[in-house]
Image: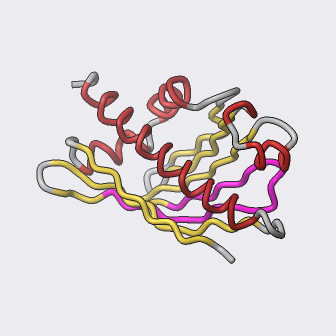
Amino acid sequence: MARRIEHHTTSPRSAEEVFAALVDESYLRDRLAAIGGTNAELVSFDKTDERTSYQLKQGVPAEHLPSAVKAALGGDLVIQRTETWAAGAGTVEVAVSGVPGRLDGAFTVLPEGSGSKTTLTGEVKVSIPLLGGKLEKLIAEQVAVLLDKESEFTSEWLAHRG
């Protein structure tokens, strides 16, 4: 059974500023360098007038994982994340190496008060008998932690750019 996820972050920066950062190649490289984990990499980046899509690779060292996850993976956690953005909204697909599962979701970046609110809604699905539900819960929790860190980084990155 899949686990629904809905997570909100807020920023003192406008929705336009946050969106512009999320589709900026130098921002993505800076964010990966700061919080991307082991062997973080911007695998691909494609931008047109209408949309931006990119693939990120991020890693979590095995020593930072719960023992059940370490046993299932047999090593570090490697996350492949593909995002496509257009007009303040985006989609995300996340696959984890060695795990038969994924996260699929949608982002929105909307004005809220004098700042903005970014929302991820989606679903985490892991097809491993007995462990699937536990892994889905863990992935959903870690996605929330990561999105909070990314939101904080985004606000700081934008503040340093005027």
Image quadrant assignment for residue 41: top right
Pinpoint residue 116: horizontal percent, then vertical percent. Answer: 24, 52
Examine the rendered structure and indicate whether residue 117 appears above or below residue 123.
Answer: above
Vertical placement of residue 77 versus 122, above or below: above
Can residue 87 be seen at all in this image of the molecule?
Answer: no
Residue 38 in the image: above or below residue 136: above
In the image, taking residue 104 as reference, residue 144 lies left or right, namely left
Front residue of 117 and 73: 73
- Provide residue 61's location: percent of width, then percent of height: 71, 31
For the C terminus, the image quarter is top left
Give me the residue at 48% from left, 45% from top: 145
The structure residue drawn at horizontal position 59% and vertical position 71%, both measured from the top left corner, is 3
Q: Would you say residue 107 sits in the magenta stretch?
A: yes
| Residue 8 spot, x, y in % from top left | 36, 57
Q: Nearer the viewer, residue 126 or 71?
A: 71
Left or right side of 145 for 82? right
Part of the protein shown in magenta: 91-109
